[in-house]
Amino acid sequence: MKAMVLKEFTKPLVLTEVKEPTYGPREVLLKVKAAGVCGTDLKIRDGLVPTKELPLIPGHEVAGVVAAIGNEVESFREGDEVLVSFYIPCQQCRNCLCGRQTICEQLKGRIGFEFDGGFAEYVAVPEACLIPKPKELSFQQAAVIPDALGTCYHALVRRAQVKKGDCIVVLGGGGGLGLHAIQIAKGLGAVVIGVDITEDKLRLMQTYGADFVIDGEQDPFWSKTVSAYTHGLKADHVVNFITHQPSIDEGLKALRKGGNLVLVAYSKEFKFDALWGHLNEIDLLSTRAATKEEIGACLKLVTEQKVQPVLDKVIKLEELNEGLQLIKDGKLKGRLVVDIE
Ligand SMILES: [Zn+2]
Ligand SMILES: [Zn+2]
């Protein structure tokens, strides 16, 4: 089969003819139809997040058709259309037992990180990671759900516990995740302020429901604008989707006393003003991906048309390196998806 293989960190992936994956008794062989591409794939390429030893086929946002099943698979059959929850948790540790599978203490791995992923014609997936795909959803839309929607849902619902009437600032709201966060926050009944740069992204944030938008480049001290817009109440939550320290610092100032800063984008280099945090009892919330249950909740939001998956560009498997460059350059207005025939 054809696959885009990472053979050396920091180097382009290589279109390679490889063997079809083998699959265990409780796994299925999935014919990949669409695979989302995200900033994490850039980190994987550059060796900045843990993965298995190379070579690796990345691709963790997968939708496809079951092509074959292991002999102990019970709930799926050949021809079933599915999407994939890419974490493979133990389901037995204290975190799994309270529904926090993405911080499983004995995580077996993740598809596209520790196991070969979906930038290929086929991928092996445990039955327990499969979620049935409703027919009315395209494979491309489905591929956006596990991460671009799921991660936002986990951050807003589980971590920040956004409630009706809360004011939330979505920092980097015009990007592939931010536009979904805006929609989910509106669905929760929050007042949403989107911060990003360029006319296009400001307009997009409004299209997807932001109540108020700020151009962070024109207005670098935008925490004052947030304060004015909220009549001095400031924001309950600032959810960050960008790796830009001055914006995070400004976001901290936009929070009310007792508010929370949610770091969806992450970097070893991020700094947090702990004095400001102390004086205002700011909660710093880290957040990691989404559980299968949360991905299921996102799927429901999409089928009920409460959230719309935002796709910018669809590319072919062999165009993946160019696609990664578009992400690196911040050129996308929505999600990038690889279409695999
Ligand atoms: Zn991703
Ligand atoms: Zn566990």
Image (cartoon, rainbow, N blue to C red):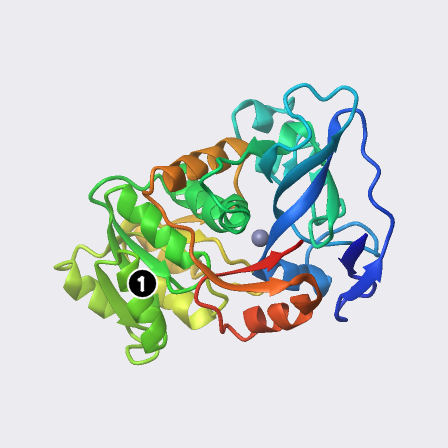
Viewer-proximal residue among 26 and 168: 26
Q: Is residue 230 left or right of residue 79?
A: left
Q: Is residue 164 left or right of residue 315?
A: left
Viewer-proximal residue among 295 and 73: 73
Query: In the picture shown, does residue 156 fall above or below 16?
Result: above
- Residue at the outermost bottom position: 218
Where is residue 317? Give x, y as percent.
68, 61
Which residue appears at 74% of the width and 43% of the height?
Answer: 123
* Residue 17, image quadrant: bottom right
Q: Secondary structure at mark 1?
A: helix
Where is residue 80? Give x, y as percent.
61, 32
Determine which residue is flagged by label 1.
Answer: 205
Which residue appears at 58% of the width and 28% of the height?
Answer: 95
Which residue appears at 53% of the width and 44% of the height?
Answer: 146
Packing grade of label 1 (10 A; few <14, some 14-19, many >=20) is: many
Would you say residue 281 is visible in this rendering?
Answer: no
Would you say residue 107 is visible in this rendering?
Answer: yes
Where is residue 76? Give x, y as percent.
65, 25
What amino acid does circle 1 point to? Met
Viewer-proximal residue among 54 and 135: 135
